[in-house]
Amino acid sequence: AQKITQTQPGMFVQEKEAVTLDCTYDTSDPSYGLFWYKQPSSGEMIFLIYQGSYDQQNATEGRYSLNFQKARKSANLVISASQLGDSAMYFCAMREGPGGGYNKLIFGAGTRLAVHP
Amino acid sequence: DTEVTQTPKHLVMGMTNKKSLKCEQHMGHRAMYWYKQKAKKPPELMFVYSYEKLSINESVPSRFSPECPNSSLLNLHLHALQPEDSALYLCASSQPSMRGGGGPSYEQYFGPGTRLTVT
């Protein structure tokens, strides 16, 4: 069965510093995808970044990068130059499927990030 | 535009009430999702519609009834709910997107949610 593990319930980082949020996964499917979502206190889940299992390079989106280590089954999110607005809950997720035109996401438990001024 | 809208933002209802949650997207996505999220927990999938047909029902109690009137709209009809159904209800939509290797990414775009309180 597919599984996502986030072992850090909470993290603190100083503004303008980089922070790494850990995510490990387990799957026997050779074709899979990994996502990171941000959820501020307002509740909306915001898509940040995606990594496909066959990607040779780590995904990057602005200040977000995904440190993909396939052999270790890890997909850590790196946020560079943290900002106060980065304070939120962060979820790692894996695509189960694909099915017929949709996917099913398996979520980790989440990591709450607090950015201090 | 990656916007999914949900109404209402907040809803308080009694256990005997009937209410509906609405979700709308105009991104041309053909898959739409309902999630339930309790405080400090990840979202739990409830229903998936693909091309306006119900594709997944995660054994959700019948007091929750989804409806997809067209490709842009998704409703969740609520009847005879219990206090433990109080939660944040999130709607999402997706479409295939070739962001990288491993097949289409199908990243889901979420709405702001409806905070439901059952009294």
Image (cartoon, grey):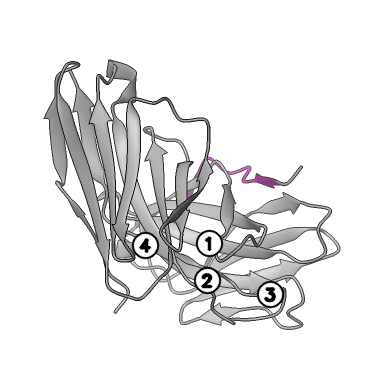
Q: Position of residue A64 (x, y in %)?
A: 50, 74
Q: Residue at x 38, y 32 (%)?
A: B38
Callout 1 secondary element = strand
Q: Is residue B28 visible?
A: yes
Q: Position of residue B47 (x, y in %)?
A: 45, 44
**Residue B89, above or below A105:** above
Residue topped by disc 2:
A49
Q: Residue at x 54, y 62 (%)?
A: A102
Q: CA distance from mark 3 to mark 2?
A: 15 Å
Q: Amino acid at mark 3?
A: Gly
- Classify residue B30 by image quadrant: bottom left
Q: Do tags 1 and 2 sit on the same chain?
A: yes
Q: Residue B52 or B105: which is nearer the viewer?
A: B52
- Classify residue A33 by image quadrant: bottom right
Q: Amino acid at mark 4?
A: Asp
Front disc: 4 or 3: 3
**Residue stretch rendered in magenta on the structure:** A3-13
Front disc: 3 or 2: 3
Q: CA distance from mark 1 to mark 2?
A: 6 Å
Q: Name the chain letter of the residue that bears numbered label 1.
A: A
Q: Are marks 4 and 1 in contact (CB under 8 Å)?
A: no
Q: Name the chain letter of the residue that bears numbered label 2.
A: A
Q: Are marks 3 and 2 in contact (CB under 8 Å)?
A: no
Q: Do tags 3 and 1 sit on the same chain?
A: no
Front disc: 3 or 1: 3
Q: How many marks?
A: 4
Callout 4 secondary element = helix
Residue topped by disc 3:
B103
Residue topped by disc 4:
A86
Residue topped by disc 1:
A36
